[in-house]
Amino acid sequence: MLNCKDMTKLISDSLERKISLRQRMELWMHIMMCGMCRRFRTNIIALRRRVRGARSLLKESEIPNTPLPPATKTRLEEAVKRQLG
Amino acid sequence: MHEPLLKLDPNNWVSEHGETLYAFAMSRLKNADAAEDALQETLLGALKSVQTFPPQGEVGPWLMGILKNKVVDRQRRLARLDTVTSDDNSVLDQLFDQNGHWSKAARYADPLQLDSLEQAEFTGILQRCLKKLPAKQAAAFIGREINEQNSENLCKELDVSSTNLWVLMHRARLRLAECIRARWAMGDA
């Protein structure tokens, strides 16, 4: 019998890979009886759904428009020139 | 200067491709010094390995390919400093007791209602919570859930086994759910 901490791992794993039939049965038995693990499962499924829904927003802010700073540009150009000799 | 190198016009690499390369490096490394180092390594590496330039190739994608390798190298080096088990037990200890049951604090906390958050609120809170995760957990979560990378590639990039990736995902989810819940309960949006 898995405790709740291990059960949250199995619940998370079930979003990453196919878990075995035996594991699936244990998971369902557990969350039928355990409100907290049921809530955890609902939460991480909702988290996945919300993240997917916000993906374009998140991606855009993930890759902020970071222009090449002029000083960096100069240093890089000089590095190339030095290397070319 | 070698003839093939001359055709590639290296003196204009920075002005022609610098912006794109820099934006990519920043998006992955999130640090101006690290991005500049990666770019410099890329440019100098490219000059030394002109023979790897594909005959019908274009300079931009070729440089980007070199940069990607440099970025992965760097991420691996960073990842080694932040190993899978370097814990983060504090959050797990708050959520579970010694027997692995949900703690009293967790059971009495206001339950998280993700669907009650508006898109902009959710995105803002999630970004703040992602910043608080250990780097490797954040990289795993962002790779899988935001960038939709397949596990195999992500494992290579993070230099972990798939079992380790699942551990990282589990920890990231526990911590994110708790962080979002706490911020939402405080009315932080």
Image (cartoon, rainbow, N blue to C red):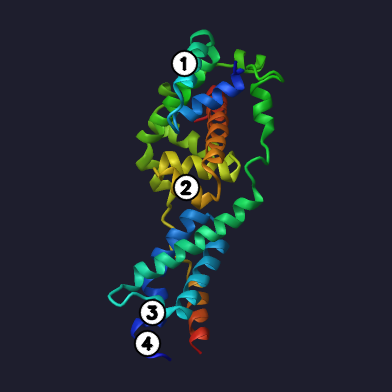
Q: Marks 2 and 4, Cα distance to the nearest angstrom? A: 37 Å
Q: Nearer the viewer, mark 1 or mark 3?
A: 1
Identified by mark 1, the residue type is Met
Residue underneath mark 1: A25
Give the left or right position of residue A52, taking residue B180 as reference. Answer: left
Task: Name the amino acid type tagged 2.
Answer: Leu
Discs 1, 4 touching: Cβ within 8 Å: no
Chain under disc 2 = B
Tags 2 and 4 touching, CB below 8 Å: no
Provide the chain ID for the residue under circle 3. B
Question: On the same chain: label 1 and label 2?
Answer: no
Q: Amino acid at mark 4?
A: Leu
Q: Earlier in the sequence, mark 2 or mark 4?
A: 4
Q: Nearer the viewer, mark 2 or mark 4?
A: 2
- Closer to the N terminus: mark 3 or mark 4? 4
| Label 1, label 4: how far apart the Cα atoms are | 66 Å
User: Which residue in the protein does label 3 denote?
Assistant: B12
Q: Does residue A25 lie above or below A74 as drawn?
A: above
Instruction: Give the farthest residue toward the top.
Output: A33
Mark number for residue B154?
A: 2
Residue B67 on image: x %, y %: 46, 65
Residue A59: image location, x then y, percent: 39, 46
Local crowd at mark 2 within 10 Å, few (<14), some, or many (≥20)?
some
Mark 1: which secondary structure? helix
In-front residue for pair B157/B94: B157
Q: Is residue A53 above or below residue B69?
A: above
Q: Residue at x 46, y 80 (%)?
A: B47
Q: Nearer the viewer, mark 3 or mark 2?
A: 2
Q: Looking at numbered disc 3 in the image, what kind of residue is underneath it?
A: Asn
- Distance from Cα at disc 3 to Cα at disc 2: 33 Å
> Badge 4 is on which residue?
B6
The crowd level at tag 3 (other Cα within 10 Å; few <14, some 14-19, many 20+) is few
